[in-house]
Amino acid sequence: MRIERRAFLRGALIAAGGAAVGAGAMAAPRLFPPNHLPFGGGYAPAADRPEFEVHGQVRTVWYVETDEPIVAFTFDDGPGPNWTSTVLDALDAYQVPATFFMVGQHLAAYADLVKGRLGRHEVGNHSWSHPDLAMLDEAGVAEQIGRAHDTIRRYTGREPRLLRPPYGHLGGSTLLAADRHGYDLVLWSRQMHESAYLHNEAGQVSEIVNGVSPGQIVLAHDVGAAERLVAIKHLGEMFAGLRQRGFRFVTVSELLALGRPKGISP
Ligand SMILES: [Zn+2]
């Protein structure tokens, strides 16, 4: 994506230079191609805000820089009857804190599953009904994020500070909604690959235990297709293996607080 954009920019610069040198021999660059997205409205625009309407920045995090062996496990899409309780049991057995990116309507339906069980865990916003936010305009995203925010507050008594957009898809409308709530946008730097290990579950364990590096955010799911069990059934082994490597488990907010920008000493 970045390379494509660079190539595009380089092409535009060459075209512009050619136009100057060759006295119009080359066509001027088309800065506004006919198929461009709308400049206002729709899902893409994130700019043209009066200063008082925005906070100034939205932090987007894939991992943090740190020498400390810390890692944040995250579980998306719950809560749900399959398999939120199993995940919570594994986290309890190993006293591991995690971050749950909850879908608002799932929490409203299955709040009992997590009631009294979120003690050391963190809860983030994963939208109300898990649509592709990158295809919704500002009003649509505001509804999805706002409704989930209120639901999380109502059922968990906590104010979410983190947003993970479904599928990791981002549009300008999501940036603006995140800014309005003062959220950090949390993506991931490692994820479970359950479908690749359907007949080799030990391989999934080994990929996590041996692959995780300090500061990473690991994506997993506590709701979904049966193949999710490839990871869920073996969480304990992953936790034990990572502890053996010296790793400590933290929530995403703890990870953000402990990490530091690259190259800056504490
Ligand atoms: Zn999701």
Image: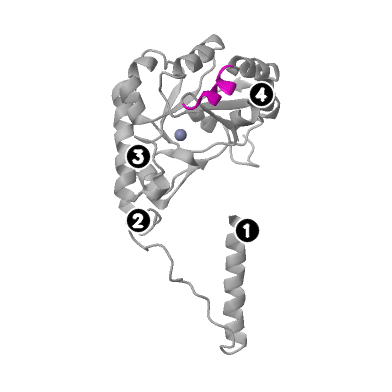
Give the residue drawn at x 41%, y 34%.
Answer: 126
The picture places residue 128, in percent across and down from the top left corner, at: 34, 34
> Which of marks 4 and 1 precedes in the sequence?
1
Indicate the secondary structure of the residue bearing disc 1.
helix
Circles 2 and 4: CB atoms closer than 8 Å: no
Report the residue marked by disc 1.
3
Q: Amino acid at mark 3?
A: His
For residue 106, which quarter of the picture? top left
Report the residue marked by disc 3.
181
Tell me the number on the disc at residue 199: 4
Q: Nearer the viewer, residue 48 or 170?
A: 170
Q: Is residue 100 above or below residue 184?
A: above
Q: Nearer the viewer, mark 2 or mark 4?
A: 4
The verdict on label 4 being within 8 Å of ligand 1 is no
Q: Amino acid at mark 2?
A: Gly
- Does 174 sit left or right of 29 as displayed? left
The picture places residue 216, in percent across and down from the top left corner, at: 60, 32
Marks 4 and 3, how far apart at CA: 43 Å
Circles 4 and 3: CB atoms closer than 8 Å: no
For label 2, count other residues whose C-alpha is less than 10 Å away and answer few (under 14), some (14-19) or many (20+). Answer: some
Write down the region rendered in magenta: 224-233
> Which of marks 3 and 1 precedes in the sequence?
1
Marks 2 and 4, how far apart at CA: 44 Å
Report the residue marked by disc 2.
42
Indicate the secondary structure of the residue bearing disc 2.
loop
* Main SS of residues in magenta: helix
The verdict on label 1 being within 8 Å of ligand 1 is no
Q: Nearer the viewer, mark 1 or mark 3?
A: 1
- Does 159 sit left or right of 188 as displayed? left
Give the residue drawn at x 42%, y 48%.
Answer: 134
For label 4, count other residues whose C-alpha is less than 10 Å away and answer few (under 14), some (14-19) or many (20+). Answer: few
> Which of marks 2 and 3 precedes in the sequence?
2
